[in-house]
Image (cartoon, helix red, strand yellow):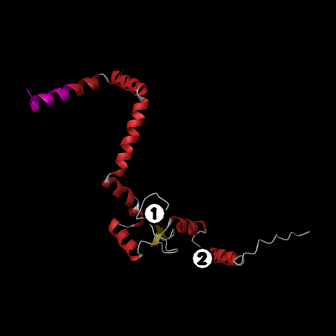
């Protein structure tokens, strides 16, 4: 015979009261159980995490995480990506929508004004970041690279002797 809902509620309340009154005992038991079953727990957690990462709602959250700090919605991001044909605004490589993978699109923005400039691949975004978003430094880097474009080797620096 199935227990009534009222009976289930009473049992749940009684168990909650017992747990509250025996916190030290429950905590010690749980700690001992976790220690004795740590390998099984580790396997379970890794399997659960792998499945969790595949859920469509989780993928969507991961994909668009952090856009609000740029004032972008997922729709705004998608519009920007579509307007760039899913390619990096600098090197035109195909990009994945968002995420932590190397090919994922990065939101490029001005660090002073926070104005979004476009979507870049990770390499281009890092490159202009390392060059401090400074056109003068970028121009100097272009001139530097152009001097070696013909395949000539680096000339040793002259020292003042």
Instruction: Classify the position of the C terminus by image quarter.
Output: bottom right
Q: Which residue is drawn at 34% across and 58% down?
A: 60
- Relative depth, front residue between 66 and 35: 35
Could you say where residue 120 lies in the image, as x and y percent from the top left?
A: 48, 69
Determine whether 65 is above or below 38 in the image.
below
**Mark 2 highlights which residue?**
135
Q: Main secondary structure of the magenta part?
A: helix
- Relative depth, front residue between 140 and 17: 140
Could you say where residue 103 lies in the image, as x and y percent from the top left?
A: 48, 63
Q: Give the total number of marks visible in the rendering.
A: 2
Q: Is residue 11 magenta?
A: yes
**Mark 1 highlights which residue?**
104
Determine whether 80 is above or below 15 in the image.
below
Instruction: Classify the position of the N terminus by image quarter.
Output: top left
Answer with left or right where residue 150 lies relative to residue 86: right
CB-based contact (under 8 Å), mark 1 and mark 2? no
Could you say where residue 126 lies in the image, as x and y percent from the top left?
A: 55, 65
Answer with left or right where residue 135 lies relative to residue 83: right
Q: In which quarter of the image is residue 66?
A: bottom left
Q: Residue at x 38, y 46 (%)?
A: 50
Q: What element carries label 1?
A: loop
- Relative depth, front residue between 21 and 42: 42
Real-space Cα separation, disc 1 to disc 2, in angstroms? 25 Å
Could you say where residue 105 lies in the image, as x and y percent from the top left?
A: 45, 66
Q: Quadrant of residue 116?
A: bottom left
Q: What stretch is highlighted in magenta?
A: 1-14
Query: Mark 1 vs mark 2: which is more N-terminal?
Result: 1
Q: What element carries label 2?
A: helix
Front tag of 1 and 2? 1
Q: Which residue lies furthest to the front in this view?
A: 151
């Amino acid at each position: 015979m199935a227990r009534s809902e009222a009976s289930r509620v009473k049992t749940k309340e009684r168990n909650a009261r017992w747990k509250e009154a025996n916190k030290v005992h429950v905590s010690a038991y749980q700690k001992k159980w976790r220690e004795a079953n740590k390998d099984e727990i580790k396997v379970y957690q890794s399997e659960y995490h792998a499945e969790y990462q595949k859920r469509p709602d989780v993928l969507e959250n991961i994909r668009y995480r952090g856009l609000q700090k740029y004032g972008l919605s997922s729709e705004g991001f998608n519009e920007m990506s579509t307007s760039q044909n899913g390619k990096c605004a600098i090197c035109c490589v195909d990009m994945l929508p968002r995420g932590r993978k190397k090919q994922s699109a990065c939101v490029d923005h001005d660090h002073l004004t926070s104005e979004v400039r476009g979507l870049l691949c990770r390499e281009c975004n890092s490159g202009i970041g390392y060059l401090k978003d400074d056109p003068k430094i970028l121009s100097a880097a272009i001139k530097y690279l152009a001097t070696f474009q013909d395949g000539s080797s680096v000339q040793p620096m002259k020292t003042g002797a």
